[in-house]
Every structure is written in C-alpha cells, then in structure tokens.
Amino acid sequence: MKILENIVCSFCGSLCDDIALGVEYNAISKVRGGCAISRRRFLGPIDREVPRIDGEEAGFDEALDAAVEILAKARHPLIYGLSSTSSEAQAAAVKLGETLGASVDSTSSVCHGPGTVAKQLVGLPTCTLGEVKNRADVVVFWGCNPVEAHPRHFSRYSVQAKGLHIEEGRRNRKVIVADVRKTATARIADIFLQVAPNEDFQVLTALRAVIGGAELEGEAFGGISREEIRTTCNVLQNADYGVFFFGMGLTMTQGTHYNVRQALSLVRDLNEKTAFAVIPMRGHGNVAGAETVLVWQTGYPFGINFSRGYPRYNPGEFTVTDLLSRREVDAALIVASDPAATLPARAASFLSEIPTIVIDPYYSATAKLARVFLPSAPVGVASSGTVYRMDQVPLPLKKVIDSKYPSDHDILLAIDRGVTACSASKGALSMIL
Ligand code: SF4
C-alpha cells in the first residue's frame, strides 16, 4: 500500500490539508486525519456512473456531441454550479460562457452572494485561518454551525486550536454564537445570543450603537436583552484579536445583504478599538474559488451575462433562481452541483422543461432530469487542480487514483472546442449560401 501525505479534502470550505491516504490497486483503502464526511468522500466508489442521453445509457463521445449540439443551438443558455470543482474548471466554464454568450452563475447566488454584495458596499477587513488559530482570543459564529457543517474547523483553526498567542486553545478563547436555535455550536458558546427569526439586523444595529457609545432605549432588540447586548459588547471590544464568522443564517434570512452590511460595519467599528477580522463561513469546497475566478476573469463574482459579447453583472436578473423562475433560458449546463435538490421548486422544475446537461461525478437529482449526463473524474481524488479555502488561500488538489472519465476541466474545454467548431462551420456554410 502506498501512503500519500498532506492531501487536501475538498468537501467543505475548511479544505483540511493534512489528510493521509492509503492507496492500493487504484483504490483508496485508508483515510487518516479526516472527519466522517471526508472519509465517506475518499472511500466512496468512483466511476460507478455511465454517460446518459434522455436517461438511457450512451457512449461518452455520443453524450459529449449531444451536449455540444444543445449548447450550439441555444440562444440563451445558462452555465451554473461550479462550487465543487477546480478553479481550472471554473475558468473553462467562464470561457465557454463567453463563447456561448451565456449567463454564468455559481451557487454563491443562493448562499453567500448577499455577503459578497455587502462586501462591495463596505469592504472586508479579513485575515487567514492561520491568524485565527494563532491570535484570535474572541471568536464569533453568527448564523453558522461549524460543529455539523465544518467538523474540523474548531480543532484546526478556531475554538480548540492552539497557536502562537493561544497556547491553551479553548481556555484562551471566548466564543460567542448567534443563531435562531440552540445548535451544536451554540452549546459550546460562552455567550449564546438566541436571535428572534429574521431579526439579526436589529441585534447587529444594537451592538453597533453600544460600540459607538450610544445609550440603548428599550429592553430587548431582536430577542436579545439590553443586558446581553452590553455584555457581548464588552467581550467584543476587550478582545486582543477578534474574528467574526458568518453563515447562511445571516446571508439568506430576511434582510440578506443589509444584515451582512451591518455585520461588516460592526467589525469595521470594532477596529477603532481593537483588531477584528471577518471571514464568510463558506460551505462547498471551492465556492470561494468560483467567486475569485469569476472576478479575475470578468470583473464580477456571480450573476454574469455575456449575451452582448462582454460581461454584465446583475444579481436578481442573471442569477440562477431568477433566470429559471422567469423561464428566461433555453438550455442549461450544470457543473458539479445539484440545483434540483436545492433551488425553489418553481426554478428547479424548469430544468426538466429545457435541455439540461449535467457534468458531475455523481448521478444527482439534477442528473436524473437532465437530457445529457456526463460523468467526470472527482476532483481531488481522480483529478488535480486548485481550490480556494474560505479565507481565500489557494491550495493544490492532487490526483491520487485514475478514473476512466476526464475531469470537469477537460470536458468543459472539449465542449468549448465543439461549440466553436459548430459556429465556424455554420459561418462557412452561410458564406457559401
Ligand atoms: S472539515 Fe471539511 S475539509 Fe476538513 S476533513 Fe471534514 S469535510 Fe473535509
């Protein structure tokens, strides 16, 4: 058995890079260091799926040709997903989007997109997870539950991690959790703020007011008493180095980007008194990479449209839920995500009414309703690439075993070549005619 060290797990935004794998006969048989989710991911079978057209088994090249034909004919195609694949594949998807004049959107638009909009308004005083581990003596988790969603976040980076100035881990840290219910993360908190549903904005505003020196009038704010607000502010402003993590409990509840704008403003205010940073608690392994790649390729993070030959950005117009609910696309290419299982029913059901192509190592709910399914080599297992951790640190993924299928990146490049060849031959034909 060959032992491979320092492998990156790309399942969640923590991207733990200390996994050891035992590999024999082109199969992973041992995982050391990962959490239960990561063990399932590495030990799960690959290459179990087959290419399909209209649900029927097909050859890979035949399915690829069918995908090219659909996209070459489409007038308003959508490319969506991208959060669980490599940054190389994300860049290839943008290139294909430009070739097609398509809308390109990532799962960001249905998770942390509002946080990104708020970042464009306020800025993001941020830091790396290394700084959290080595310096942070106050850690806030707002609307996120890392105990269940990022199982090794506490031990590697935040609550229990020992670091340069945090020699005793948990004992050197104060933990504040804000959520609408007592989650597993809330159970370990020193201060738990049980916020009334959809009233995060009120609580954050009250915190900002007290930090700014105002006297609060009233007894409670968004379900939090005046006394709890004062105590929380004392802990926040007496931190040597504080870090504020926020999740979808803040970005996707009523108020969306206004909530995050208030949270980022609170962190900005705290920097008048001490050092404080903020990190979005990104879920999917490379959703941070999707935004980064789209920004460097187009200038915009998600919700982009190329129909005029140059990128335009408009969340609410070119974002997946809006395009599908308004039935404004005539074909969809879904890469490494499962919108049929996650989008509102009205948007998801439209995917079965238009020709949909899915590129994914797994036969997802979306793959089941797709016209064409192209299985791919799972990234970080049977294909290599780059991924971005939630703090924007890029990490390399290694290919550890072989797959009989190409990577998402190679499939996207092949589709792009096919579509370009189709338009060239159409152009030549129209010149002859
Ligand atoms: S915490 Fe996330 S990145 Fe780390 S091993 Fe578990 S699933 Fe993988």
Image: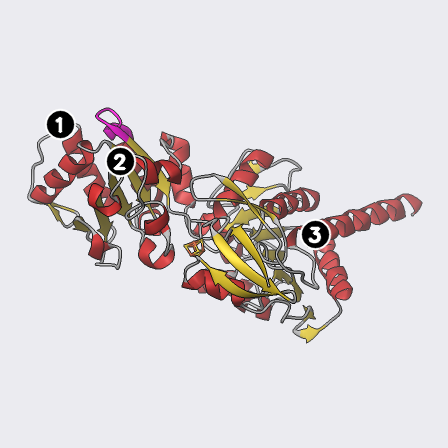
Q: Position of residue 30 (x, y in %)?
A: 52, 65
Name which residue lies at 55% across and 42% down: 304
Quarter location, residue 187: bottom left
- 235 is higher (above) or lower (below) than 425: above
Amino acid type shown at disc 3: Asp
At a point 15% along the width and 40% down the height, the residue shown is 232
Query: Which numbered disc, 3 or 2, marks the residue that appears first in the sequence?
Result: 2
Within the magenta stretch, is there residue 270? yes
Say the numbered circle drawn on residue 242. 2
- Report if residue 303 is visible in the image: no
Q: Relative to the observer, which residue lies in front, 326 or 136?
A: 136
Query: What's the amino acid at mark 2?
Result: Gly
Residue 267, horizontal then vertical, whole percent:
28, 33
**Amino acid type assigned to the residue bearing label 1 in the image:** Gly
Q: Which residue is mark 3?
A: 410
Numbered mark located on residue 213 in the image: 1
Query: Does residue 240 appear anywhere in the picture?
Result: yes
Residue 342 quadrant: bottom left
Whole-Å distance between the Cαs marked 2 and 1?
19 Å
- Marks 1 and 3, the one that precedes in the sequence: 1
- Whether label 1 touches label 3, CB < 8 Å: no
Mark 2 or 1, closer to the camera: 2
Quarter of the image holding residue 405? bottom right
